[in-house]
Amino acid sequence: MLNPFEIRETIDMISKENLDIRTITMGISLKSCAGPDIDTVCGKVYDKITTLAKSLVKTGEDIEIQYGIPIINKRISVTPIATLIDALENPTTEDCVKLAKTLDRAAKTTGVNFIGGYSALVHKGCTRGEDLLIESIPEALASTELVCSSVNVGSTRAGINMDAVRRMGEVVKKAAELTADTQGFACAKLVVFCNAVEDNPFMAGAFHGEGEGESVINVGVSGPGVVKSALEKVKGEPFGVVAETIKKTAFKITRMGQLVANEASKRLGVPFGIVDLSLAPTPAVGDSVAYILEEMGIEKCGAHGTTAALALLNDAVKKGGVMASSYVGGLSGAFIPVSEDAGMIDAAKCGSLSLEKLEAMTCVCSVGLDMIVLPGDTSAATIAAIIADEAAIGMVNSKTTAVRVIPAPNKKVGDTVEFGGLLGTGPVMRVSDYGSGEFIARGGRIPAPLQSLKN
């Protein structure tokens, strides 16, 4: 049972330190919707989503009111849509876009913030449906509001599909061009993965994996401000004390997530899946992973020592979280999305934080290069090379890595892009002046590393 001190502590975490449940995400299998006719499939998809998720938003709001815990987003993830495209008779890219628009309509009917799963898993090769879906991504994201897309181009077991990497560089570039009026906003809804996980509740990379059941409730918790506040009380203490403080704080945050997950599962009659205990920042002052690193003694995020501080943070968060819930999953750790983190924005603007330093930090954080704005004239080959670098880190280290970059049309280094809301403000970051075109043009597959042979 909670004692009065713990109750007051939790209230302070919510009211003063930006503690929240970042998302309740309902995963829905669309396998039963597969068929040869696109119109029939779209009808089944819409009906299934709107039936299973009809009470999702209201349930989240009711839990917020009852427990006083902010739940920022209610979301849906679905089976990778490429699976449904493969089952169609003579599919086209127009069919893909039609399905994307169906997802968008279903999301708006249910009232959720986003729907993820316009996805393809092509780490070893492409089917016809996956090929068409990838081709359709720019138009699909440009013509919808709430649909999020992801493509998995590599894994530790399969290596890296460099043909898919090359294509995704082109897709990102085209998606930005098609949404030039919103500064390339379509790219904020697109992520390229290595070692994508099946139970991620966070957008833009959420999809309902092959190993999942008919439907599931996954919850993503957050609370960088809470961790920073806790560390303020141990200023100057050794790293062992720092790690222990973060562990205890992560435990409390995750227990709150477990409570909300169980309650949502019970009320919706949908099995509970996992709690993702990631520290997901926002542009709000104090709600920043960068500020946690600076609280450890880094003068400005990006300075020497930043990667070591992030490694400690990520590890301690996971150790504390797994003691609070038996079902921890998703990405779990610390996110470093530049435009969504007030401290990262400041560090990028003043020059302390570079793309190269961010890449180093992704070796020890829970995802990768996230919400980074690039100059509008960045080539598709350079974007593909950035994806390849990040996929290599994930492949060799047996971890999930991802790239979500926005080559903002007509923007140059020093400019800023305003996305608003949780997506925040993106300072345009410098990329290398030297090209990687010949490297990307080789194609084929980078072989899996030796550590893939674990059987």
Image (cartoon, rainbow, N blue to C red):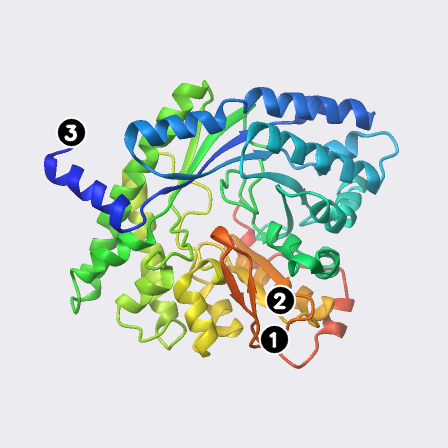
Amino acid of disc 1? Val
Name the residue at 41% across, 63% down.
342
**87 sits left or right of 432 in the view:** right
Amino acid of disc 2? Ile
Q: Is residue 200 above or below residue 193?
A: above
- Pick the residue in front: 84 or 136: 136
Q: Which numbered disc flags the more N-terminal residue, 1 or 3?
A: 3
Residue that mark 2 sits on:
386
**240 sits left or right of 149 in the view:** left
Residue that mark 3 sits on:
1
Q: Residues within 10 Å of mark 1 (few under 14, many from 20)?
A: some
Q: Is residue 354 above or below residue 191?
A: below
**208 sits left or right of 59 in the view:** right
Name the residue at 62% across, 62% down.
406
Cα distance in 3D space between marks 1 and 3 = 53 Å
Q: Which numbered disc flags the more N-terminal residue, 2 or 3?
A: 3
Name the residue at 74% across, 51% down.
138
Q: Are marks 2 and 1 in contact (CB under 8 Å)?
A: yes
Indicate which label's residue lies in the foreground, 2 or 3: 3
- Can you name the residue that lies furthest to the left here? 4
Residue that mark 1 sits on:
431
Dot 3: what SS? loop
Percent coordinates x, y for residue 455 in the rendering: 53, 44
Cα distance in 3D space between marks 2 and 3 = 49 Å
Q: Residues within 10 Å of mark 3 (few under 14, many from 20)?
A: few
Percent coordinates x, y for residue 223 in the rendering: 33, 49
Amino acid of disc 3? Met
Dot 1: what SS? loop
Dot 2: what SS? helix
